Image (spheres, helix red, strand yellow):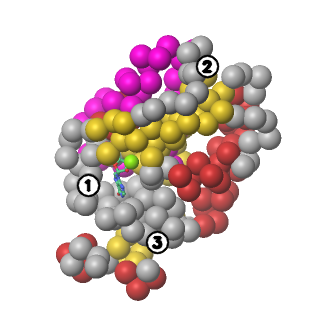
Amino acid sequence: MEKDIARVVVDEKQIKDKLIELSKTLINDYQNKEWTIIAVLNGSLVFLADLIRLIPFSVRLDTIDASSYGDSTISKGEVNIIHNFKIDIEGKHVLVIDDIIDTGNTLKKVLADIKKYSPASLKSCVLLNRSGRRQSKIKPDYCCFNVGDDFVVGYGLDYNNKYRNLPYVAVLNDECYRRNCP
Ligand code: IMP
Ligand code: MG
């Protein structure tokens, strides 16, 4: 994978430090509450796994599947949501976790879908924020890093379902996107 990387955007140390800071904020905001995290699959999984292990009290967990990109680097605009919640979120304090907010269409649709289940509160938390292409008026409640317009991979984020297991966030070589990364 290393040979495909053009540059690292957020390195491992920056992620580690930021997650400690974020966990302290979340601990303060959610302690003594019935807290439920809903992770947007699949991109948020690495972020989620590292974050929840910094939380010293019990947190309920479920997932939601939202897809819009397919094998492209440009959002198709429409978002497909698939969920099959195994836990009851009515009256619970729900935090949606995603890897990145770009156009905002995914988070907007996910939040609207979850809202129907009457949570006590509903907030969102993203690892990355790309504000330059926003289409939906939406601002995440918690955000770790701002990124530029380049498509990024790693730390859960994929291109063609690859590179999720890179421990940092990076931009791929142009050539790699062109040849569709075989
Ligand atoms: P939005 O609906 O345009 O805000 O896009 C959100 C979703 O698109 C995220 O949950 C990611 O799965 C995916 N996405 C957006 N930008 C990137 C990127 O730079 N790399 C990988 N996935 C991305
Ligand atoms: Mg996603």
Binning the other alpha carbons within 10 Å of mark 2 as few (below 14), some (14 to 19) or many (20 upward) gives some
Image quadrant in which you'd find residue 3 = bottom left
Is 118 contained in the magenta span? yes
Note whether ligand 1 is within 8 Å of mark 2.
Answer: no
Binning the other alpha carbons within 10 Å of mark 1 as few (below 14), some (14 to 19) or many (20 upward) gives few
Binning the other alpha carbons within 10 Å of mark 3 as few (below 14), some (14 to 19) or many (20 upward) gives some
The quadrant the C terminus occupies is bottom left
Question: Of residues 134 and 64, which is closer to you in this image?
Answer: 64
Residue 87 appears at what percent x and percent y? 58, 27
Is 169 contained in the magenta span? no
Query: Alpha carbon of mark 1 to alpha carbon of mark 2: how far?
Result: 32 Å
Question: Of residues 8 and 180, which is closer to you in this image?
Answer: 180
Tell me whether circle 1 and circle 3 mark residues in contact (CB < 8 Å): no
**Residue of label 2:** 92
Q: Residue at x 38, y 24 (%)?
A: 113
**Residue 70: mark in rendering:** 1
Q: Amino acid at mark 3?
A: Val
**Residue of label 3:** 8
Residue range of the region highlighted in magenta in the rendering: 109-138
Note whether ligand 1 is within 8 Å of mark 1.
Answer: no
For marks 1 and 3, give the one nearer the viewer: 1
Residue 43 vertical placement versus 65 (above, below): below
Q: Secondary structure at mark 1?
A: loop
Tell me whether circle 3 and circle 2 mark residues in contact (CB < 8 Å): no
Q: Amino acid at mark 1?
A: Gly
Query: Alpha carbon of mark 3 to alpha carbon of mark 2: how far?
Result: 38 Å
